[in-house]
């Protein structure tokens, strides 16, 4: 590799880390909210942690589609900025706010139905009451999140991720302080228990959403007037956002549903196996922390290059740099998990049977994470090229036709390990097909540029 090529790789890596680093705190913030809520409610009562845990899972499942659909604003913004059509971003934001309004009505309807269906869950009367109180308060975060993240996604697309990360980072200590004061009656306040945790979430999200509004003061937003912007069909309209975003939302729903079904199957092996599986899956999710930022940075940079009309070698070079960084991250995670598997298991459970099973499962997690990190970069590259329907079809096939089916069959010989082997096969399948499809899309991109009618 020539010196010039090495310098280019270093510049690409530095830019990816600059963009992706702050976005790591978005992931950390979301994980912290769920973790702090779980810990706080566990201090209140077993009924509280069970009721709130189930409610959070259903709440996230309900709004995940809408939230990820709006995230399409990021790649569209990056493409517009790269192509020199920055003035059209205002119209895109106008479409985003209109879509957020529609999503608020849809999500509110689903959450009201969820509230009425909570008595059907396997909870005591007290648990149902706590779940309904929690949901009745937290439901107000939905409009705050939807409207604020229209600006956040646009800021990310413009390459301005620092303040997004800083605001998310600041939200965590605020939430801890409010939970300490409201739920447990500190600073002279009356202890409110579960409603106090819910109010802490609501107030923290409200403060964070207000802070996100100040992203509009960044110089990159100057001249963007969403009030006067006229959405353009196929470029900045609602349909464009949905064409790119809806498959991403469906992909997440598919992943959540397949995970839930695997959990149901594993529960048949006994409570120890289910507990070990849940712990291993939690470690698997937490290990996404660094690759999340890198994958979002890849989406932004690929979208920007596409907008600039960059050549296939330029886009391929960026993707290969991101892929190499992902390999390093995956290998680092593999070594750390292998080295400290027993210690990690001991942090989660004092039960010897559960801890031993977790330690064994973490060997699977360590290897699978390496495949998943690389797969996420390939997926992010396709998202940057706006080929999200492909992402959904490949992911859904890998979740259900490969992962769940092979896991179920292998479980007859390997027990719980069979399902984790199935998860690994699903990721290998998805990564392989992503790679083939990405190569085809890049070749097609070159063909379009060379075409006389292009």
Image (spheres, helix red, strand yellow):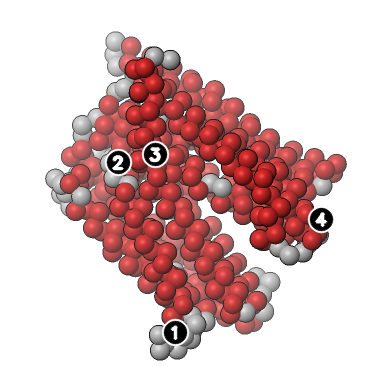
User: Upstream in the sequence, badge 2 or badge 3?
Assistant: 3
Identified at 68% across, 35% down, the residue is: 425
Check residue 159 in the rendering and tell me which mark sits there, or answer none.
Answer: 2
Report whether 223 appears left or right of 391: left
Residue with the most extreme right position: 413
Q: Nearer the viewer, mark 1 or mark 4?
A: 1
Q: Nearer the viewer, mark 2 or mark 3?
A: 3
Q: How many marks?
A: 4
Whether residue 384 is visible, yes or no, is no
Mark 3 neighbour class, 10 Å CA radius: few under 14, some 14 to 19, many 20 or more: some
Query: In the image, is residue 80 above or below residue 183?
Result: above
In the rendered image, which quarter contains the N terminus?
top left
Q: Which residue is mark 1?
A: 186
In the rendered image, which quarter contains the C terminus?
top left
**Displayed quadrant of residue 98:** bottom left
Q: Nearer the viewer, mark 2 or mark 1?
A: 1
Q: Secondary structure at mark 1?
A: loop
Q: Secondary structure at mark 2?
A: loop
Q: CA distance from mark 1 to mark 4?
A: 43 Å
Label 1–label 4 contact, CB within 8 A: no
Q: Nearer the viewer, mark 3 or mark 4?
A: 3
Q: CA distance from mark 3 to mark 1?
A: 40 Å
Q: CA distance from mark 3 to mark 4?
A: 42 Å
Identified at 24% across, 30% down, the residue is: 83
Q: Secondary structure at mark 3?
A: helix
Q: Position of residue 251 (x, y in %)?
A: 53, 44
Report whether 280 appears left or right of 151: right
Check residue 269 in the rendering and tell me which mark sits there, or answer none.
Answer: 4
Q: Which residue is mark 3?
A: 17
């Amino acid at each position: 590799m020539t010196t010039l090529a090495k310098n280019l790789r270093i510049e690409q890596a530095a830019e990816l880390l600059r963009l992706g680093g702050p976005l790591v705190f978005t992931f950390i913030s979301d994980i912290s909210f769920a973790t702090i809520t779980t810990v706080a409610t566990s201090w209140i009562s077993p009924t509280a942690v069970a009721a709130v845990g189930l409610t959070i899972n259903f709440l996230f499942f309900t709004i995940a589609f809408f939230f990820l659909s709006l995230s399409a604003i990021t790649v569209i913004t990056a493409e517009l900025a790269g192509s020199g059509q920055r003035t059209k971003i205002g119209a895109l934001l106008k479409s985003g706010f209109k879509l957020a309004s529609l999503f608020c009505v849809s999500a509110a309807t689903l959450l009201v139905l969820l509230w009425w269906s909570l008595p059907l869950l396997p909870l005591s009367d007290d648990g149902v009451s706590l779940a309904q109180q929690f949901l009745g308060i937290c439901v107000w975060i939905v409009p705050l999140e939807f409207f604020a993240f229209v600006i956040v996604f646009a800021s990310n697309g413009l390459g301005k991720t620092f303040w997004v990360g800083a605001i998310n980072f600041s939200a965590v200590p605020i939430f801890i302080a409010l939970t300490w004061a409201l739920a447990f009656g500190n600073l002279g306040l009356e202890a409110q228990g579960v409603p106090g945790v819910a109010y802490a979430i609501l107030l923290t999200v409200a403060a964070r959403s207000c802070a996100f509004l100040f992203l509009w003061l960044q110089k990159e937003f100057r001249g963007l007037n969403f009030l006067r912007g006229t959405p353009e069909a196929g470029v900045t309209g609602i349909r464009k956002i949905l064409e790119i975003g809806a498959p991403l939302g469906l992909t997440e729903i598919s992943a959540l549903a397949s995970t839930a079904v695997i959990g149901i199957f594993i529960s048949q092996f006994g409570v120890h196996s289910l507990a070990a599986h849940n712990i291993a899956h939690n470690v698997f999710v937490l290990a996404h922390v660094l690759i999340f930022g890198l994958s979002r940075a890849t989406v932004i940079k690929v979208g920007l290059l596409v907008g600039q009309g960059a050549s296939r070698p330029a886009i391929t070079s960026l993707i290969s740099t991101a892929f190499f960084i992902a390999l390093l991250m995956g290998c680092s995670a593999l070594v750390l998990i292998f080295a400290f598997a027993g210690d990690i298991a001991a942090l989660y459970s004092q039960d010897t049977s559960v801890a031993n099973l977790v330690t064994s499962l973490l060997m699977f997690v360590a290897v699978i994470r390496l495949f998943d990190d690389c797969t996420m970069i390939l997926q992010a590259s396709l998202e940057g090229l706006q080929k999200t329907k492909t992402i959904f079809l490949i992911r859904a096939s890998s979740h259900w036709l490969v992962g769940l089916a092979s896991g179920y069959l292998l479980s007859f010989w390997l027990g719980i390990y069979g399902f984790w082997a199935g998860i690994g096969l699903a990721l290998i399948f998805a990564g392989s097909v992503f790679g083939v499809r990405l190569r085809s899309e890049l070749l097609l991109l070159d063909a379009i540029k060379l075409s006389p009618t292009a």
